[in-house]
Amino acid sequence: MYIIIGLLILAVIVGLAFAVYYSSEKQTVYTDLKGKHVVVTGGSSGIGKAAAAEAARLGAHVTIIGRDVSKLTSAVTEIVAKCTDKEQKIQFAALDVTSDYNAISKCLSELETSVGPIFMLINSAGMCICGEFDKMKVEDVKQMIDLNYFGTAYPTRYVLPGMKQRREGIVVFVASEAALLGIYGYSAYSGGKWAVRGLAETLFMELLGTGVRLTLAFPPDTDTPGLKNENLTKPKETMLISGSGGLQSADMVGKKMVHDALTGRKYSVFGFSGNLMSLLFCGSIDSLSQILVQISCMGILRTIVVGVLLSFHKIVWDGLKEKKETPKNK
């Protein structure tokens, strides 16, 4: 009797999973970017530069955007070396993506006039300043929200109407694993990246049937100049927690992000922790395997995450205990 009930439940689960998956929108898979115009914000270093280099290797015309002209010039030289066709255009635009929307719109419009319509926008501009929220400078909080959220929202707002009119285009949002789980010391940074995730998961629905798609990436700690700056402000507890997820290379993250976007993946995740948290917390349907795992294994996955959270809490409590004991030892 119990075996029959179990088989019936399994059949219902599998049936629901297949029904949901096969009723979802089918997407074009791109194998290269030949002749396409790819724009990368934050493209002068780190993940953005790696993604731009991979787009160039796949045949794209690439424009990188940033504020530091010397870094942009150096990055263009590196990206040109990845080109496979002498006709490819590789250039930069010096622009602050948190500036007035009209300035961003004007810059991107000029790029489309000179190079061609933007086929792929990779929103990689971002920064992190760590610290306990009530001890952070208010201007640092605002700077992170401006860059991490508005620096993604503004360029995306510009490209979507044109992409929808052409019925093709890809937008990539670079969030963070800190957009999946609140972590000690990442309060202001997480706020901006959670906002990016909220925007992306709303756009997944709004873009249905338009031919335009979006990929949301959740990189963990990645070996970039940005991480080196971030580590300067990280509390000890934050360093221990974020370090538990390992360190990824910018080259690997940038490449995987581009290829996940080309193959139509909604979420681009990295390593065990990224896969686990995306299965638990991401709200959109990405694949048949995702649906089956979520339906059949959610209890097990949640148990694992509870264990992870308890270990994080222990790190914080140990830190508090150490801070209380330190004055007594002096």
Image (cartoon, helix red, strand yellow):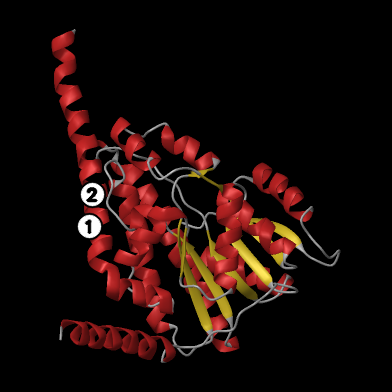
Q: Residue 19's mark?
A: none
Q: Where is residue 232 in the image (x, y as percent from the top left)?
A: 42, 31
Q: Residue furthest top?
A: 330
Q: Position of residue 67 (x, y in %)?
A: 58, 49
Picture residue at 34% right of the left edge, 57% below the top: 179
Q: Quadrant of the C terminus?
A: top left
- Disc 1 is placed on an element classified as helix
Q: Is residue 121 visible?
A: yes
In the rendered structure, the answer to whether residue 151 lies left or right of residue 305 reads right
**As displayed, is residue 86 above or below residue 148?**
below
Q: Quadrant of the N terminus?
A: bottom left
Measure how far apart labels 1 and 2 are at the Cα level. 6 Å
Q: Which amino acid does label 2 sit on?
A: Gly
- Disc 2 is placed on an element classified as helix
In the rendered structure, the answer to whether residue 39 lies left or right of residue 297 reads right
Q: Residue 303's mark?
A: 1
Q: Nearer the viewer, residue 148 or 276?
A: 276
Q: Position of residue 213 (x, y in %)?
A: 50, 78
Picture residue at 24% right of the left edge, 35% below the top: 315
Picture residue at 79% right of the left edge, 66% below the top: 88
In the rendered structure, the answer to whether residue 236 lies left or right of residue 6 reads right
Q: Which of 330 and 107 is in front in this view?
A: 330
Q: Is residue 42 visible?
A: no
Q: Which amino acid does label 1 sit on?
A: Thr
Label 1 close to label 2 by CB (< 8 Å): yes
Q: Label 1: few (<14), some or many (≥20) within 10 Å?
A: few
In the rendered structure, the answer to whether residue 138 lies left or right of residue 327 reads right
Which residue, given by chain and number where applicable, does mark 2 sit on? 307
